[in-house]
Structures are given as structure tokens and as C-alpha cells.
Image (cartoon, rainbow, N blue to C red):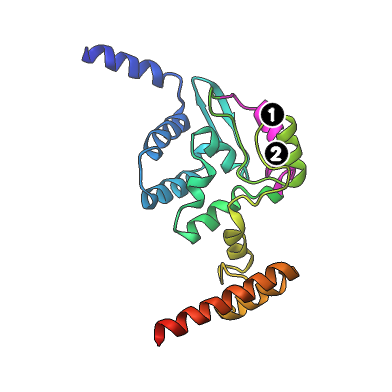
Amino acid sequence: MANNGSSVASFQHDFLDLHGQQVHAFSLEIANVGFSRMAELLLSMLRSGAWRSYKDGQGQYNFLPGEFDYFLSQRGVQRGEVMDLPDIDAKAELEEAMDERCTGKEGIRRPILQVRAENPQVPGRPIEPYGYTPSEAKALFNSGTSGARRGRMVLGTRVRRYTNTGGATTKTARDELPRVERLRRSAFHLDDGDLADLIDALKQEQRRRKRHND
């Protein structure tokens, strides 16, 4: 039985080039790790460059420098998993290699339909973008892929703000305001009926607290 297992493993690896072996090992490990180890694996694979060009039993894969999310989606790593990573610096580095704003830039990032046509497809794991521009959203919708028709930042607004500010903050100017001021400004946007309901609710809360203190 051991010999048969070795023969099967040898047969499988006959389809893999050196980078393919690295990608295969990455795919196996990334499926069973916690967030801290996941960040390490993602950055290690990104920096290695092995994901850019590799071969397995499906054929030859080639990805451009700004297509790391295309690669990850085909390896079974979902956008939500990457967004849930607590390490903002790691996510900022990852964002640089999957920035949806670069879609269509020569030698950087191809449109999703093009990259699908130019790479083998893994059954059950279609190549998906984490983020997309409004024009890409239309292409996704027309191709039968579920998703919003609007654009979407690759790893969300917090990471984009962090990279745009050179790592200074993930917060907007509004986030920096005192809580009461944020609530006050939110109230300004209510219509008359909702504002009246809010005022009534606040008065009721004041009366409840007064009774409790008495």
C-alpha cells in the first residue's frame, strides 16, 4: 500500500513544475490555518513570485503583478477571509498586488474575462476579482457572475484609506470627532418625522433616567 501511495504522489508531481509544487503546498496549508499564520503564508507567496507562473495538471498559469486576487480566488482563498485579517500592514501590502484601479493597465492587471480566457479553469473555483471598477462590475454581471453592478474596493475602505494616507490612519475625519458630535451630525440628515421620533425617544430616555436616579 505504501508503494502505491508513493506512486500516486509521484504521478501527481509529474504534472507540477517547481512553482507548481510551491503553489500546491500553499493551497493545502492555507485551508487550515489561523489568521496570524494566514497572513504569513499570503505574504510569503506574494513575495516569492511563484504564483506569477506555474504549471499543474490543469495546464500553465500566468498572472500579472496586479492579479494576486485572481490567483487567490482560484486557490480557494475568499475575499472575506483576507479582509478579516487583523494585520492592516499586511493587507496594505496585499492590496498593492490586487488594486482594481489598475485593471486594464498594460502589464499590470488584465480585465477579468481576459484573464479567465488566458488561464486554465479549476472546476468549482472560477477566477474572481476581489475588487472591481464599475465597468468591470458590468462585465461580471453580464458573464453570469453574481456581484454588485457598482464598483468595489479590493479590500474595503479602511485598507484603501490606510494606503492613501501612507499608513497614517484608517479613519475618516468624521471618525475622529467626539461621539456626541457624530451623533448630532447624523441627526441633521433625518427627515422631519424621524427627527421628531428621535427627539421624543431622547426625552423618554431622560425621564427614565431621572426616575431611576430618584
Q: Residues within 10 Å of mark 1 (few under 14, many from 20)?
A: few
User: x and y percent of residue 64 in the render?
Assistant: 63, 40
Q: Residue at x 57, y 77 (%)?
A: 202
- Quarter holding the C terminus is bottom left
Q: What amino acid does circle 2 point to? A: Arg
Q: Nearer the viewer, mark 2 or mark 1?
A: 1
> Taking 12 as reference, is 19 above or below it?
below
**Tag 2 near tag 1, CB within 8 Å:** no
Q: Is residue 193 left or right of residue 56?
A: right
Which disc, if any, is residue 158?
Answer: none
Q: Residue at x 57, y 42 (%)?
A: 69
Q: CA distance from mark 2 to mark 1?
A: 19 Å
The residue indicated by pointer 2 is: 110
Quarter-of-image position of residue 71: top right
The residue indicated by pointer 1 is: 144
- Quarter holding the N terminus is top left
Q: Is residue 12 left or right of residue 53?
A: left
* Residue 71 visible (yes or no): yes
Give the secondary structure at mark 2. Answer: loop
Mark 2 or mark 1: which comes first in sequence?
2
* Residue 173 visible (yes or no): no
Q: Give the extent of the magenta segment.
A: 102-121
User: x and y percent of residue 178 in the render?
Assistant: 56, 80
Q: Nearer the viewer, residue 166 or 158?
A: 158
Magenta part, dominant SS: loop
Q: Residues within 10 Å of mark 2 (few under 14, many from 20)?
A: many
User: x and y percent of residue 80 in the render?
Assistant: 51, 46
